[in-house]
Structure formats: structure tokens, C-alpha cells
Amino acid sequence: MPSPATLRSTAAAWEALFRAQVTVMREIQKLPEFKELSTREYDVLFNLSRCDSATSRLSDLNQHLLISQPSLSRMADRLESKGLVSRQPDPTDQRAVLITLTDEGARLQKSMGREHVKGIHDLIGTALSTEEFATLQELATKLRLHVETP
């Protein structure tokens, strides 16, 4: 069994991971597909596309995003005004709001998603080997699951 990480090695690895993400995200935000919607707006559409019936409670959707609940609510208003999502009261809880991807929202998400994947590949696809990307995915998933598991 491997020895536990030191405080220094944990901090150094986290800093490297965080800096890599910031650097990559800054470049992703410059990609042409994000002229129509911001990366955060796209992230809402993407996460909705992964939900059953492309519908989620705002509070549940917020668990997958890095924005506050009030910011998500305002963003949902903007996306609704663009015809990309619809909002309605949750029939099982009148305090909750359901947000659903419209047909136009689903079309835009798929279109942007195809370009987004190509843009990510163009940006970082040659930085690592297939095996290194598999290891990165495995390690990132392991970290996420460790934090999510109480």
C-alpha cells in the first residue's frame, strides 16, 4: 500500500492541477463557439442535456456547477429569454423550480458541444499520450469520488 501524501506534496499537486485548469479554461473561453453563449451558460445546457428528460430542479442542477444558486437563477432567466430553457414550478414541491432544455437549447448545446470537443482536442490533445489522458481521467475521478463520498 502506498504511503500517505505529505502536506507539501498535496498542496503542490493541487496547485499544479488548479493552475492547469485556469490556464486551459482561459484558452477555452476564447474559442469561437463561446461567442454566442458563455462557458458557464453552455455548462448549464450541457448538464441539463445529461438529466432525465433534459429536466432538473435548479437546486439539483446547481450541484454540478461552480456558481451560486442566485447566479444560476439569473442565468436561467437569461437562457429562458433566449428560448434555450423553460422554467416551471415543480409539481411535487411548489418551492422548487424545474428547468428544462428546449428543443432549440438542445440543438445549440449539441452544435456547440461538437465544436467544444474539437477545440479542447486542438488545445490539449497533443500534450499527453492516450495512456496519460486515461491516467489523468482515472486520477481526477478518484479525487472527485473521494471528496463526494462522506
Image (cartoon, grey):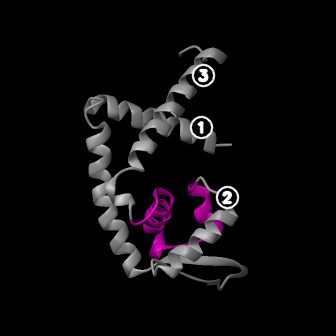
Secondary structure beneath dot 1 equals helix
Instruction: Kindly identify the amino acid type of the residue bearing the numbered disc 2.
Output: Ser
Distance between the alpha carbons at the discs numbered 1 and 3 = 14 Å
Residue at 53% across, 15% down: 2
Q: Cβ–Cβ below 8 Å for labels 1 and 3?
A: no
- Residue 6 shows in the view: no
Q: Secondary structure at mark 2?
A: loop
Return the residue at label 1: 146
Q: Are marks 1 and 2 in contact (CB under 8 Å)?
A: no
* Residue 77 position by quadrant: bottom right
- Which of disc 3 and disc 1 is earlier in sequence? 3
* Residue with the mark numbered 3: 10
Q: Is residue 49 magenta?
A: yes
Question: Residue 112: horizontal and vertical position, in percent?
Answer: 33, 63
Vertical side of 32 occupied by 76: above or below: below
* Mark 1 surroundings within 10 Å by alpha-carbon count, few (fewer than 14), some (14 through 19), many (20 or more): few
Residue depth check, mark 1 versus mark 3: number of the one nearer the observer: 3
Residue 95 lies left or right of residue 53; in this view the side is right
State the mark number for residue 68: 2
| The quarter of the displayed image where residue 62 is located | bottom right
